[in-house]
Every structure is written in structure tokens, then in C-alpha cells.
Image: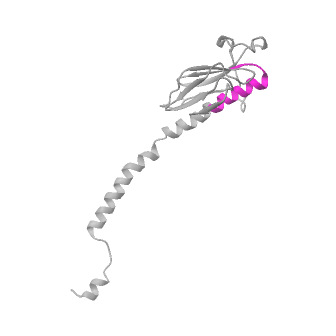
Amino acid sequence: MNTHHARHMQGFTIIELVLTIVITATLAAIAIPRFFTTTAFDQRGFNDEVINALRYAQSYAQRTRCNTRVQITTSGYQLFRPANRVSCQSMNSGDFTTALSHPVNTTIAFAGSAPSGITLSVHNIIYTSLGSANTSQDISVGSATIRVEATTGYTHSL
């Protein structure tokens, strides 16, 4: 073989090509499934939605000087207010029978459903006209936790 000719031959060996394919396949097997599962994104988004709903209920109670209740079930949440002004200072969950309207679309109730695969812990939270909550509560949204502080009504993720 001519040494001059061998120096100018370029390309990859079969071993280099096989190793490249093996590494690429391994990375694809690990990384691609992460792009197609949205559970973590859905959970984070719904966690933020629940926090915003709780904060809205607190704000509504302070603005209207009428207590509000947030009912959280395993599959979603809904906001309520008393049916009449006489019950505005009530702490009895049974007095909160009127659904709060959504602030953007007032023709629908302010409520939300959990995405598939995400469950919540059951709670009834009442915000007073001063913004405080009836009790401190930890709300589970999937594997995330939201805390509502009783004295201030402060709502935050843990």
C-alpha cells in the first residue's frame, strides 16, 4: 500500500460508528420519554392555579367584607360565598351556598378540575373579611404541598 495514499484516506472506523450509535441510542432511551410525559408540568401548573384561587378567595373576602369558602375535593376546587349579607361573618360551611363567579368570565363559577393523574387532599377553607383563614392547612396537590397560614391567610408552596 502506498503510504502517501493512506495518509489522505479519511473516514470513521466501524468501531467508532457502532459506539456513536450505542451512545445516541442510550441517550434517546433516557431523554425522549421525559419529553412526552407532562405530569410534572401539569402538577406545577395546577398547583399554581390552586394557589391563585386561594389568594383570590382571600382577596374577595377582604374586598367585600364577606367571608368566603374554598372547597377542595380530591378532583378539584370551587369558591363559595354566603347566599345573603346576613351570613357574611359566618364560619359555618353550610352557609356558603352561592358559587363565586370567575373574575374573567362572570357567567361561570370559579372552579377548577385537577388534570388526569393529579389528586388533592380534601379541605374546606374559610377566609374572613380580615384575610385570615379559619385554620392553618396543608393542601396536597399531587406530590406538591400548599400551606395556608391561619393568622394571616398567607398561601404559599412548601
Residue at x-position 70% and y-position 29%: 56
Question: Which of the pair 64/158 is nearer the observer?
Answer: 158
* Quarter that holds the C terminus: top right
* Quarter that holds the N terminus: bottom left
Q: Is residue 93 above or below residue 22?
A: above
Q: Is residue 36 above or below residue 131?
A: below
User: Is residue 60 located in the magenta-colored stretch of the structure?
Assistant: yes
Our reading of the magenta stretch's main secondary structure is: helix
In this orientation, does residue 126 appear? yes
* Residue most extreme to the front: 151
Left or right? Give the position of 59 relative to 72: right
Left or right? Give the position of 23 relative to 127: left
Residue 107 is situated, as x and y percent measured from the top left of the image, at 71, 26
Left or right? Give the position of 156 relative to 12: right
Q: How is the image coloured?
A: one colour
Residue at x-position 54% and y-position 31%: 145
Left or right? Give the position of 106 relative to 112: right
Residue 72 is situated, as x and y percent measured from the top left of the image, at 58, 22
In this orientation, does residue 107 appear? no
Question: Which of the pair 84/129 is nearer the observer?
Answer: 129
Please tell me in which quadrant of the rendered image residue 139 appears: top right
Question: Which of the pair 77/146 is nearer the observer?
Answer: 146
Q: Is residue 37 above or below residue 143?
A: below
Residue at x-position 61% and y-position 30%: 50
Please tell me in which quadrant of the rendered image residue 67 appears: top right
Residue at x-position 32% and y-position 78%: 10
* Residue most extreme to the left: 1
Look at the image and give the residue range highlighted in magenta: 51-68
User: Is residue 118 located in the magenta-colored stretch of the structure?
Assistant: no
Q: Is residue 44 above or below residue 67?
A: below
